[in-house]
Amino acid sequence: MSLEQLEALLLVQERDIALDQLRHRREALPERAELTARAADLRTQDATRADVRERHRVVLAEERRIDDEARAIGERADDANEKLYSGTIQSPRELQAMQADIEMLRRRRSDLEDEELEVMEQREALDAELSALDGSIDALWARVTELQSTIASAEAEIDGEIGREQQERAVLAQPIVESLLRDYERRRAQNRGAGAARLVGSTCQACHLTIPSTEAEHIRRAAGAEIAYCDNCAAILVP
Ligand SMILES: [Zn+2]
């Protein structure tokens, strides 16, 4: 081992820190949180729309049923009225009974028409609700699509930076012997980020704790000929 290799280790670590930050930035893109929220809104509104559509279907069927019935009763009244004035019925009692029937049918039709009007108002309110939901769902879809494309381009940009950092790291790691590089990587993984640390005086710059000054002096004199580790955080110490 040599001091140059230990120095290279610190440079590799700088690139590794930059890579961690890039990966974190990729994961924590603010658009991701908004996308999750908008997608949830979309699911909720889709479910609401399905529910409103079902209510609309029921009310519309009721409206049609009442309309058909009113129409049929109206036709019956018209037929009876025609018969009443056709002169085919002579008996005054029969004529009177028929007139009463016609009045009854017309009242029934008028009641049905009132009922139909009420149901129509309900249906129109549901029409408005559906059209508002359609608008809102369309807008949500547009936002979701926009967010997906923003995320995709941010990812592509970050991936490009990650690629460049990795290339730089590979170049910096070239002079380091494989066993030392693996040792550093293992320590870095176990130590939440610090695989190697500069030794300043008797202070490790990774954990900022001190080692005995005689030990620090020994490490400085060895000048990379042997590998030393911080007693506290286990980072490879670079004199
Ligand atoms: Zn340390």
Image (spheres, grey):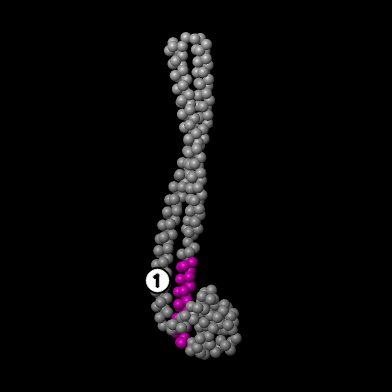
Q: Is residue 197 visible?
A: no
Span colored in magenta: 1-24
Q: Is residue 214 left or right of residue 133?
A: right
Q: Residue at x 47, y 46 (%)?
A: 136
Q: Residue at x 54, y 83 (%)?
A: 229
Residue kind at label 1, given as amino acid type: Arg
The answer to which of 96 and 23 lies nearer the viewer is 96
Image position of 222 with respect to 25: above or below:
below
The answer to which of 185 and 92 lies nearer the viewer is 92
Q: Is residue 65 visible?
A: yes
Q: Residue at x 47, y 76 (%)?
A: 13
Total numbered labels: 1
Image position of 8 with respect to 160: above or below:
below
Q: Classify mark 1: residues with Cα within 10 Å, few (<14), some (14-19) or many (20+).
A: few
Q: Main secondary structure of the magenta part?
A: helix
Q: Is residue 174 left or right of residue 110?
A: left
Residue identifier under label 1: 164
Q: Pinpoint residue 1: horizontal percent, then vertical percent.
A: 46, 87
The answer to which of 102 and 126 lies nearer the viewer is 102
Q: Pinpoint residue 96: horizontal percent, then vertical percent.
A: 52, 13
Task: Verify whether residue 13 appears in magenta.
Answer: yes
The answer to which of 47 and 105 lies nearer the viewer is 105
Image position of 61 with respect to 106: above or below:
below
Q: Pinpoint residue 98: horizontal percent, then vertical percent.
A: 50, 15
Q: Secondary structure at mark 1?
A: helix
- Ligand 1 within 8 angstroms of badge 1 C-beta: no
Q: Pinpoint residue 140: horizontal percent, then vertical percent.
A: 46, 50
Q: Quadrant of residue 87?
A: top left
Task: Verify whether residue 107 appears in magenta.
Answer: no
Q: Residue at x 49, y 56 (%)?
A: 36
